[in-house]
Structures are given as C-alpha cells and as structure tokens.
Image (cartoon, rainbow, N blue to C red):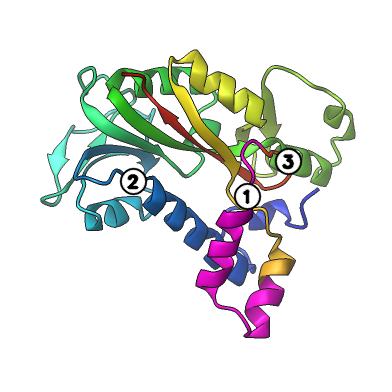
Amino acid sequence: MLPIPASELNGSGTLGPYWTFYRAVAAEQLRQWLPGTPSLLLDLSGGRGRWPAQMTRAGHRIIEVMDFRRPPDRGLHDVSRRVQKVRADTLGFLPDESVDGVLAEERVLSVEIMAESVIEDVARVLKPGGRALLCVDSLVLGMAILAEQNYWAHLCQTGEVMLIPWPDGSITRCFTSQQLRELITGAGLEVDWIRPRTVLSPSTVDHVLGSGNQSLSWLVRTELETQADGDDTVGIHLVASARKPG
C-alpha cells in the first residue's frame, strides 16, 4: 500500500518535501501538455490550484469554473485580461466545440461521483482536435484508504465503480487505468496516454533531496522519464491526456 496516512494526502500534512516535488511534477506535466500556440482553455479544477497562472504565462486565455457542480452564482465575469471566472453546476453556459483544451485537475473527476456526466460535457465543449488533461484518484489510493480504516472486506470486492469513504466523511471515486480509459472513450474521446502522477515514494524523495547531491528539477525530470503508460500499480493519482477526434 502507501506509506502515507490519509491525513497527509491533501498536501497539508508534514510531508513538505514530497508535496513540493509532487506539485513540481504536476506543473511540468501541464507545461508539456499545453498547446504550442495561444488557445482558449477551460479549467475545471474549482479554483483550488495554480493552473490558470501557469497557463496564462504560457500565453493562453482561461475560463476557470469555480466550485464545479455547485449552484450557479452571478455568471461569467472578467477578473483579468486572460482569466475569466464562472460559478456553474454544468457547462451549459458554453456552446458546443468552443474551447481548445480542458484541464480537470485537483481530483475533480473523483470528487464528482458521476464523472461520466462531466466527461460528456468536456467532450461536447471541446473543438475537434482539442485535448483534455485529467487527474483522478487511483485504485492504489482507494485500497490504502480502506486498509487504514480497517475495511478489509472491501479490499476483496471488485466492482464497476469503486467509491471510497474517507475518514472525514467524504466520498471519492477511484479508478484503475482501464476504468479511466473506458470513461474517456465512452464520451467519444481518444486516449493519448494514461500515467501515474508520481511513482517515487515520499521516502525516496526525502532521501534524494536531503542528500544534497541532486536538485528538485533533476528529480522531476527523472520521475517523468521513467514513467510507464497505463501503470496503475503505483501512485496515488492517475493522469490522462485525451483528444477529441477531428
């Protein structure tokens, strides 16, 4: 399982070096994924990340959906020249094939149990050839949370949908790489790749960074160069890149 207690998995615990590394990996994955030309991108991460700042620095315009799937607020409004924020419970405010790319970070497809509805909306608003970058909780994470709460019987159950109760009472939906692939293709999108966000353990990260022999950038580069597509036997989160045909 994972050498990380549930209380540490939101990044607010004591594993500072690991979460610094994790955020650096996520930022580099996004940098490599971003379109090479200025584009209109939709961010479904709920305002909980730093993604709009990174994307605007790369020259893109952003529509940032705040608190996705919650009651709508006052609608779309400008907050800068390149970022617009909107509160909405669906993507109905966007016309079909209106954005070049969609980012769904911060586990939004796992927190939203009916992920099928979200991904269908994503496919609808993407232009032909547009891409999506998605992050979900992995089966490894789900099994670790169950084990930590002594739900041993649940570990033997294999179902179509794996819903995991967290110690704080919330529910998360966890995916294998195959389930994530089926979610994406079921909405009519094509999978470019599916990978774990990270494969290096917190103890490895602490050891390497603590030794002073290698930098954080070297560790991030090593992480991304050694990942294998479709490997869901390690890592707390899976990341997928998908594309709309056309």
- Please say whether residue 221 is visible from this viewpoint: yes
Which of labels 3 and 1 is toward the front? 1
Relative to residue 19, is residue 159 depicted above or below? above
Query: Which contiguous range is marked in magenta?
Result: 206-230
**Mark 3 to mark 1 CA distance (whole Å):** 16 Å
Q: Is residue 30 above or below residue 86?
A: below
Mark closest to the chain's N terminus, 3 or 1: 3
Residue 209 is inside the magenta segment: yes
Q: Viewer-nearest of labels 3 and 2?
A: 2
**Which one is earlier in the sequence, the residue at label 1 or at label 2?**
2
Q: Does dot 3 land on a helix, a strand or a loop?
A: helix
Q: Position of residue 173 (x, y in %)?
A: 61, 30
Quarter holding residue 91: top left
> Mark 3 or 2 closer to N-term?
2
Residue behind mark 3: 140
Name the spot of residue 44 as percent of width and height, x first. Answer: 36, 37
The reply to whether callout 3 and callout 2 are in contact (CB within 8 Å) is no
- Dot 1: few (<14), some (14–19), or many (≥20) neighbours within 10 Å? some
For mark 2, give the secondary structure: loop
In depth, the one of 101 and 3 nearer the eye is 101
| Image-quadrant location for residue 209 | bottom right
10 Å crowding of disc 2: few (<14), some (14-19), many (20+): many
Residue depicted at 73% across the width and 41% down the height: 140
Q: Name the residue under label 1.
A: 227
Q: Is residue 51 left or right of residue 2?
A: left
The Cα atoms of the two marked residues, 3 and 2, are separated by 28 Å
Q: How crowded is mark 3: few (under 14 residues within 10 Å), some or many (20 or more)?
A: many
Could you tell me the amino acid type at mark 2?
Leu
Q: Name the residue under label 2.
A: 34
Q: Is residue 92 above or below residue 66?
A: above
